Structures are given as structure tokens and as C-alpha cells.
Image (tube, helix red, strand yellow):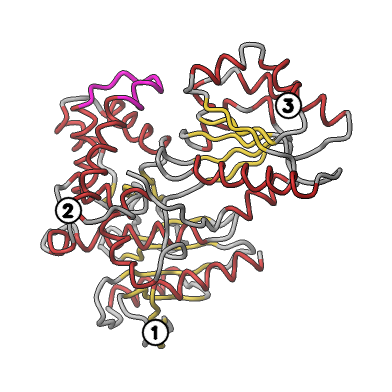
Amino acid sequence: MNTPAIPRTLRSTIEDHLALFPAVALLGPRQVGKTTLARAIVDASTETRTRLAEPGAPRPGLYLDLENPAHLQRLSDARGYLGSVRDRLVVLDEIHRVPEMFQVLRGVIDDRIREGEPAGHFLILGSASMDLMRQSGESLAGRIGYLALDPLDIREVPAEQSTSLWIRGGFPRSFLAPDDAASALWRRNFIRTYLERDIPMLGPRIPAETLRRFWTMLAHSQGGLWNASALARSLGVDGKTVMRYLDLLVDLLLARRLPPFHASVRKRLVKSPKVYLRDSGIVHTLLGLDDLDAVLGHPVAGTSWEGFVLETLVRAVPDGARASFYRTATGVEMDLVLELPGGTVWAIEVKRGLAVSPTRHLRIALGDIAPERAFVVYGGTERFPLQGGAEAIGLQEMVSLLYRCKAVA
């Protein structure tokens, strides 16, 4: 299925990083659009270099897929080959398949730095998590910048398609499918490919059916507190094993562990994290929900929307911000607490409907957390104050507000 390219908001940030670092690692799940974006940057740099044809123009690009045997053959003498294309921006796709390449890159980069070429040599693409890539790339410390490409979010699609984005999720081929049935078919095959091909290639030996059951259990409990013992009993494994399954999905950027916020209050607070599957479309497919009516008729609708909003907002926060949730043992809760750079705290509650009224639990939570600002993100678009100091705000405007903070930071 051919899909049109969607302009990604991260592109300018990648180009800025390439102007600062010898190498830039662009991470994200498979099929999220890393290759498409990297090729666009390669094509643009090549076109600009050809047009300007002068010293200092952006380097022309070269794309190498490390899953392609022909491309791997070129790298049989990697240092020699990369030395022969020193005037080009080289994209190395799926580099986590060849982790020894990081050591080679260190030598190549250091040679170029000594010769007065400090930035813009390599754009590295990987499907593993930032932590795993950092471990593999320790030899490039000080020479590499890290960025994550997430699925599409509401800034990258027309406002009137935000509901479709929630139902289908943000993987480009799923979102851009001609109809809901084609979108659901793509997501089913995406899940199957991860289970049967991608995860085994990354090393863990986990039966595909066991991991599918685990993935589906997480979808059923979207946004719930992590309960390793209950999941372990259901799967017939021990607690350490089920924790390893979760670590795997987190490392693959498919799940998010949201930690609890610890306020200085004399109340018993929950200590377990919440767990969300990061793409709402994957949640719906794991539960067999292929369209809006099916989702709205299922008990997961509320927590699916909550996860969709949370993921959208967490992507928009400034670098260095910390995201968490607040919950007491008595059930007083705040869906999202953001500790922004400088120590400012924002509290955010998520409601799917159009009616917004501050509840007693919301007022108690705000009293416990004492945030500088508080918001209820709801299904409407009008912004207005609520009793107790919070504001009702639509998702689009909340995202814009966070990005303005990001720009200032």
C-alpha cells in the first residue's frame, strides 16, 4: 500500500541536531516513519548540494539499510567505505542489528573532527529504545544526539481527523488507510510481524502466543496500575518473567510506564506505576475493535481516550520535564502531573465527554499536589475556568500551550 508522505514536525529538530553533532540517532518503533523522514532529509541535502555546488552546502545523502545484504556488503570494510563517502550525509537504518558498527563510527567521526569537520556526518535509525541505543552507543558519548520519532499526533493531521487518529492510531499506514477495515488489517499484520519476526530478531526467546496474550492483557487494562503477580498467574509464569515482558515492550517503544507522583502529604500513596500501550490503534486492534462504534461500545473507550491524550501531551512537554500520575490509597487521583523545567508543576485531568464539572476527588487532588496550574482536558474546544482554580481546555489548545512552554525552555 503506497501512502503519501506527511510532513513531520520533528524534521527541523533533526536538521538542527545534524548541525551540532557528528551523529544523530533517530529512534522509534518500526513503521513509525523513520525511514521516510530520513530519506526526505537525504533527498533535500542532495538537492541543495547539487544546486549550490559550493563549499559549506549541506552534504549530499546516502541511505544504507543494514537489513539489506547488498548494503551490508558495502560495509564489509566499514571504515574504508565510510572514509570514501566522507562528503555525504550517511543514513544507517536499523543499526541495532549491527551494534559493532558504533565502534567503527567512533573512529571515523574522530578522524573527521580532527580534520575540522565537527558535525553532520551520520543519521542513525533504530527501533530499540533510547536506553538500549545509549548502551550500544557508549563509544559515541559526546559525539551523538538522540531524538525519538513517535507515531503521528494531532499537530500533524487536520483537526477534523483527530477522532480518526484516536481510533486508528498514529502509525502512518494505519492512519492513512483508505477505510477502517484496511486500517485494522494493517494493524493486525503489524502486530503479527512484531511477534513472529521483529522480537525474535532482537534476541528474546518468548513464545509469540504468550507475548500476544500479555500484550492483549495490557490492552484490556489500559492505564491500569501494574500488577505483576496477577498477570504472572494468568500467563503461568513468575513475576520476574512478566516484568521482563513489560521491559521488552517499553524498550521497543510500544508501552509506557508512568511512575507515581510523590507529594509531601500525610496520605498513603500508591507505589506501582501505571502502564499504557502507547498507540491507541494497537490497543483497539488487540481488543478486536475496528471502528468508532466498536470502540465507543467497549469498556476500554474511556481509558483508551485517556491514554491517547496522555501520550499526546507527554510528547509535547519540554526537554527535562517529568511526567507522572497521582493516586492515594482511597482513590483520589490526578491523571497526569507534569514537573516542568524550573520546578513548575502542572496537574492535568482527562475527560472524554463534553460536560465538565470539578469533582470532590479533583479538588482534593489539587489540594494535595498544589500545582501552579491545573487543567481538565475534555472533548470540547472552548476554554473556561472551573471552580477550585482549574481550567477546562480542549486537547488541541492544551498541546499548543505545552509547545509554547517547550519553545521558551
Q: CA distance from mark 1 to mark 3?
A: 62 Å
The earlier-in-sequence mark between 1 and 2 is 2
Q: Disc 2 marks which residue?
A: 290
* Number of other residues with Cα within 10 Å of mark 3, as a class: few under 14, some 14 to 19, many 20 or more: some
Q: Of discs 1 and 2, which sits in the foreground? A: 2
| Amino acid at circle 3 | Val
Mark count: 3
Q: Is residue 326 left or right of residue 143?
A: left
For the residues labelled 1 and 3, say whether their Cβ atoms are less than 8 Å apart. Answer: no
Is 166 included in the stretch rendered in magenta?
no
Which quadrant of the figure contains the N terminus?
A: top left
Q: Tell me the residue that label 1 is attached to.
A: 388
The label shown at residue 85 is: 3
- Give the residue at x 77% y 33%: 87
Instruction: Kindly identify the residue that appears in the image at 41 percent across and 64 percent down.
Output: 157
Tell whether position 200 is magenta. Answer: yes
How far apart, in angstroms, are the residues tagged by discs 1 and 2?
39 Å
Which element is circle 1 on?
loop
Height in image: 343 above or below 319? below
Q: Nearer the viewer, residue 213 or 343?
A: 213
Q: Nearer the viewer, mark 3 or mark 2?
A: 3
- Would you identify the image quadrant in which residue 357 lies? bottom left
* Disc with the residue nearer the chain's start (1 vs 3): 3
What's the residue type where badge 2 is placed?
Asp
